[in-house]
Amino acid sequence: MDLEIEEFNASDDSFPRLQHFVVDECEYLQEIPIRFAGISTLKIIEVDRYLESSARCIQEEQKDLGNDLEVRIS
């Protein structure tokens, strides 16, 4: 089922213990909030191709903070 979500508002303190974030079949979602880059417990982001760019930006931010975030594209 496709969700027609276009915008996702969250901050780094919305999910303080998040480790694995999965977004699937949300082709209308424009981006993952960049504030997710501040979630130090985040280890994996798994997204479809629509959100690859957004996930890669978060991965780079995490890398700058010394964290090894894995991005999986489905």
Image (cartoon, rainbow, N blue to C red):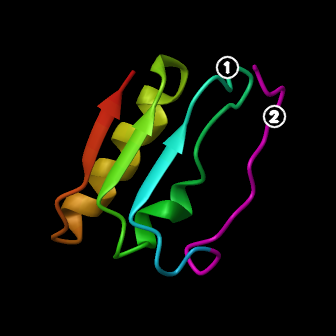
Q: Toward the viewer: 1 or 58? A: 1
Report the residue marked by disc 1: 27
Residue at position x 20%, y 59% from top?
Answer: 63
Q: Is residue 5 on the magenta stretch?
A: yes
Task: Choose the circle earlier in sequence order: 1 or 2.
Answer: 2
Q: Position of residue 57 (x, y in %)?
A: 38, 44
40 vs 22: above or below: below
Which residue is nearer to you in this view: 41 or 52? 41
Q: Residue at x 76, y 20 (%)?
A: 2
- Kindly indicate the quadrant of the structure image that contains residue 3: top right
Quarter residue 37 falls in: bottom left
Residue type at mark 1: give it: Glu
Instruction: Name the quarter where the N terminus is drawn.
Output: top right
Q: Please tell me whether residue 64 is drawn above or below residue 31 in the rendered image.
A: below
Q: Which mark is residue 16?
A: none
- Residue 5 is tagged as 2
The magenta segment is 1-14
Mark 2: amino acid: Ile
> Label 1's element?
loop
**Which residue shows up at 31% across the image and 33% down it?**
72
Q: Residue most toward the front?
A: 1
Q: CA distance from mark 1 to mark 2?
A: 8 Å
Dominant secondary-structure state across the stretch colored magenta: loop
Q: Residue at x 78, y 42 (%)?
A: 7
